[in-house]
Structure formats: C-alpha cells, structure tokens
Amino acid sequence: MMPWLRSGRDGGFGRARPGQTAPEDRGGSKLLAAAVGTGSANCNTQPLIVIHFDVNETIMVGDPAGGDTFEESLNKVVCKSAFCKKGDPDTWHTGDPVIAGDAAEGLAAPPLHTGWEWPPGCAPIYRTLKERDDKVCFTERRGFVYRPFLNRLVNELKWPDSELVVPELCHDGTHHFLIPAFFQTIATLTAQKRRFRIVIRTFGTDTSQVARAMTAFAQGKHYLHAGLNVPSVALSDEACYQGRYAEDGTFTLTDSAGTVISDENQVIRLVNGDVDATDPTVIAIQDDYKWWKKGSYHPSGGKPLWVTGSDANVHHIFFDDNIHNDPEDSIVAARHRKLESDPFRPLSGAETLGLQGTHLVRVPTLEPILDHDWFVKQIEMCEDKFRKAHKL
C-alpha cells in the first residue's frame, strides 16, 4: 500500500494512517483556557454533546447546486490535502517537481497531508492554484499522480450493487449521498447511550435533501444500519431554521412558520435543545453565506458557535472542512461568554484557533471517507480535552 497520508503534531510531518490525525489546537492552550474556562458538571452524567456538521465536502460529496459534480468535489478534496512549496505550484512539498497529465503515469505520489499544522514552507496546492478547473480536474492535471487515490475514494463511496438503492440515501443510484461516517457516528453514540444533539449547518439549499436522508436512516433504511430504529433523528421541516445576520451584526434564526428569534439566549437554548433529553435529536440551520462573503470570509462573519465557559454540562463540537489554521480565514464565528448571565462576545481569529481540538475540528474529508469511525474518534479526543479544561 502506498503511504498516501501524513499528519503532523505540533507542526511535525510524521506518517499516520487514516483516522489517526489528532485535532490540534495550534499551541493555543492559554487561549483555550481563557475561552473555555472551568465549570461544574453533574458528576453522575456525561455532558450533552451538541455536534455541528457542515454539509458540503464535510458529510456530502458533490454539490450540484454549487456547480460541483461528485467527481469534481472529490478532486477538490484531494487537492486540499496535496501540498506544494509555498507560492510554487510546480514543486511538491517533498521537493519533487510537479509533473502534469499522462507524463506522470507510474510516478510515486507525494504523501497527502491532513494535519492541522502545515509542513514548514509549504501550503495546500488548492490555495495556490487560481483557476477552478485546475482544482475540480486536479487528478487529470497537476495531481495526476493522485488519480489512483481518487479512484479509491470513489470506490469507498459506491453504493453496493447487491443492495437495494434507497433514493434518499443514494441520489444518483451509484454513490452515497451522505458519507457513511456521518451515520456511523449517530449509530455509535446511540449504542453508547450518549446524550447528543445533531445540528446540520449549511450555506447551501440542501437542507431538505439532508432531512430526507436522515429520515430514511432513522427508519432503518440504510443497508449499513439495517433495522436500526432511531426515530428522534428524523429531521422535520419544523426543525429547520434560516440563520441571518442583520446589518448591526445581530444573528437571528427564523423557523418554517416565519417566527424570528433574535435574542442570543433564546438562540442558544434552541440550539442546545432539551439538555435533559435521553434520545438524540436534530435540527438544521441554513447559515448566511452572503454575510460571510461580504466580510471577506473572516471568521467573525461565519457560522456562529456559542460557547459558555462555565458550562461543563453542554459540549459543542463543530465539524467543517473550511476551518483553517489561519486567524483571518475560517468559517466558524465563535462567540463566548464566561457565565450564563454574561453577554456573548465574538472571539478574535487567534482565540478561535485556540478552540481547535475541543470545540472545532477541521475535516480533511478524505479521512472520514476512508475511516467510518473518524468523527467518533475526533469526538472522543475533543471530550478528553474538554474534561481536562473543566477539570472533570
């Protein structure tokens, strides 16, 4: 087997198998302590986990609404983990020249990198390439050496010919609509009798499609979880909200009936749900892409995440492929308060980086495609850091 993947700790560049990449906090222990704080929890129960999942290229491959086909999306996934010398798309991070197209046939592929820290002097080639076609056709052009790996990802996401196609779970009749690791996470946490809530977060218009897929899974229609009956994770229209920023930066949620919730305390109560519920629950939020774009993709205008430092009873974890190790470029707008009686304040980009590995997890999508337990492993590592931060 080729050593496709490498992941690093503390900026290192050691080899790792898929699923072994620990969510790093970029050395932000002081920022983490300040943002999380310490608090008391009920010693008889584990904290409620509120797990936020981005959709496009986190749990869904292929974005027809955004113009990306299934294979184009997978090409982007590979491209984001292929590293070159910084500012030099003609040289791989290993120092080897980039050979495009058929001329690269038979050449060894430089290991892909899925760690939080970048190799010194290097950057994802995705950030260096300027043209869209160079990214969505990556393994046909500069990334031809990764074509066998892309084929492996395609095979991992194929719906078996031996299984009845469920349209809600297999839109094109060939591939999984949502990656199996997402459903495996729900199944595992349910089997562990954990208290958890799923929050679907998307900038797109795919909420209804995700809702139908989750409902089919909840009814036991997924062949990997045949017979599993988790009716509480069926996603209804009433549990889908539109999130929007006002010009003054206030974030509101609007439900399907048109009711607007603008008070942050009410918003966080809705996002948390019934913290004493024993069955898993789910809601969806369509976030405000136009506002994020208007703010030049700065974290402060992204998808809001609310953290109460003194609350050790609720643990928010946000999975997104667009969380970056860059204080000026990320997708989550972290908002913090020390006590429940305090107002929330936005965290700076640097403070937000300090939440990586406890409340934020960057998703190198190829990892959960290859390892169905990847999200579960990241949750376990986040919980370990959460317990230490709260001295539980």
Image: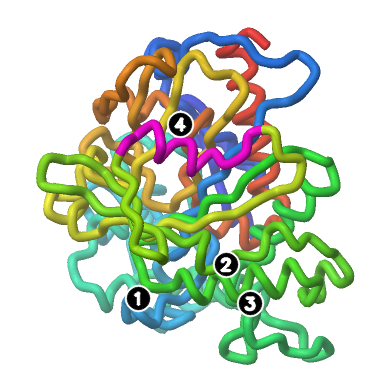
Q: In terms of secondary structure, what is the magenta stretch mainly?
A: helix
Q: Which mark is residue 51?
A: none
**How packed is label 3: few (under 14 Cα within 10 Å), some, or many (20 or more)?**
many
Element type at marker 1? helix
Q: Residue at x 59, y 35 (%)?
A: 22
Q: Is residue 91 visible?
A: no
- In this rendering, which labeled residue sits more in front, label 3 or label 1? 3
SS state under label 4: loop
Pick the residue in front: 300 or 63. Answer: 300
Q: Position of residue 354 (x, y in %)?
A: 40, 24
Q: Do labels 4 and 2 touch, CB within 8 Å?
A: no
Magenta part of the protein: which range?
Answer: 263-275
Location of residue 343 (image quadrant): top left
Q: Earlier in the sequence, mark 3 or mark 1?
A: 1
Per the model, the C-alpha gap separating discs 1 and 4 is 28 Å
* Mark number, residue 236: 2
Task: Mark 1 or mark 4: name the one nearer the start of the chain.
Answer: 1
Of labels 3 and 2, earlier in sequence is 3
Q: Which mark is residue 176?
A: 3
* Residue type at tag 2: Ser
Q: Measure the alpha-carbon separation of dots 3 and 2.
A: 21 Å
According to the picture, the residue beneath numbered tag 4 turns out to be: 356
Name which residue lies at 43% across and 27% down: 307
Amino acid type at image mark 3: His
Q: On the image, numbered disc 1 is attached to which residue?
A: 136
Q: Is residue 43 visible?
A: yes
- Asked if the residue under mark 4 is in contact with the one under mark 3, i.e. CB atoms within 8 Å, the reply is no
x, y percent for residue 67: 32, 81
Q: Position of residue 260 (x, y in %)?
A: 31, 52
Q: Amino acid at mark 4?
A: Gln
Q: Is residue 351 above or below residue 60?
A: above
